[in-house]
Amino acid sequence: MKRIFLLAALSVSIGAYAQYPTDKGSRSVGGTGRLYIDLDGSDGLTNSFSLVPETYWFVANSFALGTDIGVGFGSSKFDLNDSTTQKQQYASGWIAPGFRFYFREPEKKWRPYVFANAGYVFGSYRTKITGLPDTKSSTNGFRGYGGGGLAWFFSEHAAFDIKMTLFDYSMDTFYYNPDFKIGIQAFFD
């Protein structure tokens, strides 16, 4: 009888100290990416790619602070009229500290979250219009963005991440252009 009582007490105490991946003191490392290829091309041709590595530290249960470090590349080609074509290329990078807040109980496998980030963006652009010289420019400044996501914890320390940026404020321009990204996160104690 003493053995059963001791085993039960030990099991309960270990369960009480079990830490969920989004509990205070945990960390996450991962990233999301986006690839857009214009297959239709009826209104021009646009292609883009972005990759956003990120790291977060949970300062409270379900609330994390961290940073995103992103890069993006893209190109577009539009026919302005029968004899004039406009081609554009860009490359950008950013670093944006921010937060995440996860909803639902931590033992659930599907956990929605909200996020917001604000930081610094820099970019380089090149435009070529038929018959005119190339135009090159670079920009830098403030960037802020936010939205929501859904994490599916397929194991105790890893989750697939589906993220949707709803708003993006970059260098004095506000964009509402829902943008989906997918990725993976690893969680550590």
Image (tube, grey):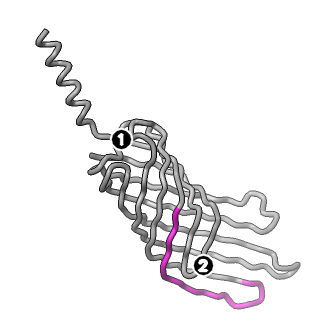
User: Element under label 2?
Assistant: strand
Tell me if 13 is positioned left or right of 151 in this view: left
Q: Which residues are magenta?
A: 129-146
Q: Where does the image place residue 93, in percent across and percent down from the top left?
A: 48, 72
Amino acid type of the residue that numbered disc 2 sits on in the rendered structure: Thr
Q: Where does the image place residue 99, in percent across and percent down from the top left?
A: 41, 61
Amino acid type of the residue that numbered disc 1 sits on in the rendered structure: His
> Which residue is under mark 1?
157
Real-space Cα separation, disc 1 to disc 2, in angstroms? 38 Å
Tell me if 113 is positioned left or right of 126 in this view: left
User: Which mark sits nearer the N-terminus, 1 or 2?
Assistant: 1
> Which residue is under mark 2?
173
Tell me if 189 is positioned left or right of 72 in this view: left
Give the answer, above or below, for where 18 lies relative to 140.
above
Q: Where does the image place residue 133, in percent across and percent down from the top left?
A: 69, 91
Give the answer, above or below, for where 48 lies relative to 127.
above
x 47%, y 43%: residue: 111
x 88%, y 78%: residue: 82
x 64%, y 65%: residue: 177
- Sort mark 1 into few (<14), some (14-19) or many (20+) by Cα contacts within 10 Å: some
x 71%, y 77%: residue: 87
Which of discs 1 and 2 lies nearer the camera? The answer is 2
